[in-house]
Amino acid sequence: MSEMMQLIEDPNMPKERRKRRVPPPMPTIPQDRIAEVRTLLADLAELYDFGHCDVYDSVFFQRTCEYMAGVSFESAPADGACMRMRDLGTEIILSKSTSTKAFIDFFKSIVDFWNAPS
């Protein structure tokens, strides 16, 4: 499990025993940052109960809508990463999905798009 996941506080722990932890700084090299995000997403995917809906689902849906509204796919390259991002985002918006698995796939596609060779 990644170091970042270990820093997430246990909500069941009594407040007097909780320690405020500062996460480590993000790596300065872009490839290392992308690797760190991929590791965090993989850890979240393993730990999250995909059948459970909570308040974060609406936040993820809103972020997906904002991101899709801010991207112009007409001027974007027609490569695999860009089309996958467009297809996943469109599917989430049209179905009004709150599937955490769909959100993780969408955010992974954004990371893949950033990491794609230009």
Image (tube, rainbow, N blue to C red):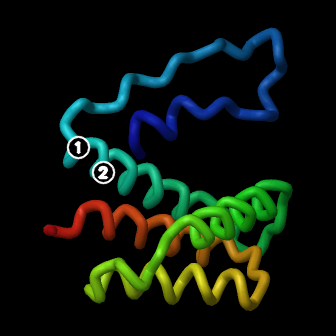
Disc number at residue 118? none
Residue wearing tag 1: 30
- The three-letter code of the residue at mark 2 reads Ile
Q: Residue at x 36, y 56 (%)?
A: 38
Callout 1 crowding tier (Cα within 10 Å): few <14, some 14–19, many ≥20: few
Q: Residue at x 70, y 33 (%)?
A: 10
Disc number at residue 34? 2
Q: Residue at x 58, y 79 (%)?
A: 89
Q: Quadrant of the C terminus?
A: bottom left
Query: What percent of the width, then of the height, locates residue 108?
Result: 43, 67
Query: What percent of the width, then of the height, locates residue 66?
Result: 66, 63
Of residues 21 and 95, the one drawn nearer to the viewer in this rendering: 95
Rendered view: 72 above or below 62: below
Discs 1, 2 touching: Cβ within 8 Å? yes
Of residues 87 and 108, the one drawn nearer to the viewer in this rendering: 87
Kindly state the secondary structure of the residue where label 1 is placed. helix
Kindly state the secondary structure of the residue where label 2 is placed. helix
Distance between the alpha carbons at the discs numbered 1 and 2:
6 Å
Query: What percent of the width, then of the height, locates residue 102?
Result: 60, 77
Query: What percent of the width, then of the height, locates residue 36?
Result: 33, 45
- The three-letter code of the residue at mark 1 reads Pro
Q: Is residue 14 left or right of residue 66?
A: right
Callout 2 crowding tier (Cα within 10 Å): few <14, some 14–19, many ≥20: some
Q: Residue at x 46, y 36 (%)?
A: 4
Of residues 93 and 26, the one drawn nearer to the viewer in this rendering: 93
Q: Quadrant of residue 98?
A: bottom right
- Give the residue at the far front of this rendering: 75
